[in-house]
Amino acid sequence: MDSITPTELKAWLDDPTRAKPVLLDVREDWEVKLCSLPSSSHIPMSSIPAQAQTLDRDATMVLYCHHGGRSAQVGLYLERMGFKQIYNLTGGINAWSMQVDPGVATY
């Protein structure tokens, strides 16, 4: 699993020549109601084992949570399940709000 900073992810998403990654939010439902990144998919961390088969193993995915801890754990799990192109958003959505988009709520 690789790490990606919020500014690196923003540049990637803004680059029309690059295929967009799947953004996977692994936070709880109540957290997603507060804020999320546009075009994200949502599977809470606790549901990943039951829903991992619904994910495309060949897709490039950027995982995120509040600060990056839960998404790192999910990334390690998915790697053990055979997923190859996994990135963890360093600092999570909180860092995204601080470094890229202050309009994203913090909590």
Image: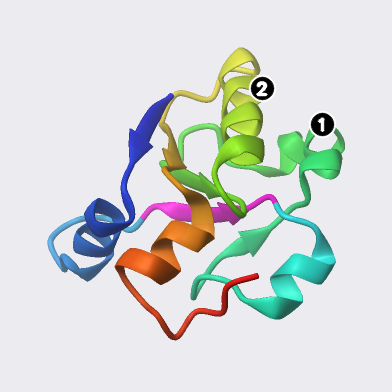
Q: Which residue is mark 2?
A: 77
State yes or no: residue 23 in magenta.
yes
In the figure, is residue 2 to the left or right of 56?
A: left
Range drawn in magenta:
21-26
Identify which amino acid the numbered label 1 is placed on. Answer: Pro
Q: Tell me whether circle 1 and circle 2 mark residues in contact (CB < 8 Å).
A: yes
- In the rendered view, would you say 59 is above or below 66? above
Residue found at x 46% / y 48%: 91
Q: From the image, give the main secondary structure of the stretch colored magenta.
A: strand
Residue appearing at x 56%, y 79% in the figure = 105
Query: Would residue 19 be found to the left or right of residue 84 on screen?
Result: left
Q: Quadrant of the N terminus?
A: top left
Q: Amino acid at mark 2?
A: Tyr
Left or right: where 105 falls relative to 59: right
Q: Which residue is mark 1?
A: 49
Q: Which mark is residue 34?
A: none
Q: Residue at 36% x, 77% y: name it.
A: 101
Instruction: Assess disc 2: are there few (<14), some (14-19) or many (≥20) residues with their C-alpha within 10 Å of its C-alpha.
Output: some
The one of 50 and 35 positioned closer to us in this rendering:
35
Residue 96 in the image: state x and y as whole percent: 41, 63
How far is disc 1 from disc 2 in space, using C-alphas?
9 Å
Residue 41 image position (x, y, % from top left): 62, 61
Residue farthest to the top, as pictured: 80
- Using the image, determine if residue 4 lies above or below residue 102: above
On the image, the x and y values in percent for residue 13 come to 28, 64
Question: Tag count in the figure?
Answer: 2
- Please check the rendered image and state whether residue 22 is part of the magenta-colored stretch, yes or no: yes
Question: As drawn, which residue projects farthest toward the bottom?
Answer: 103
Instruction: Describe the element under mark 2 as helix, strand or loop.
Output: helix
Mark 1 surroundings within 10 Å by alpha-carbon count, few (fewer than 14), some (14 through 19), many (20 or more): few
Q: Residue at x 23, y 52 (%)?
A: 8
**Whether residue 54 is situated above or below residue 97 in the rendered picture:** above
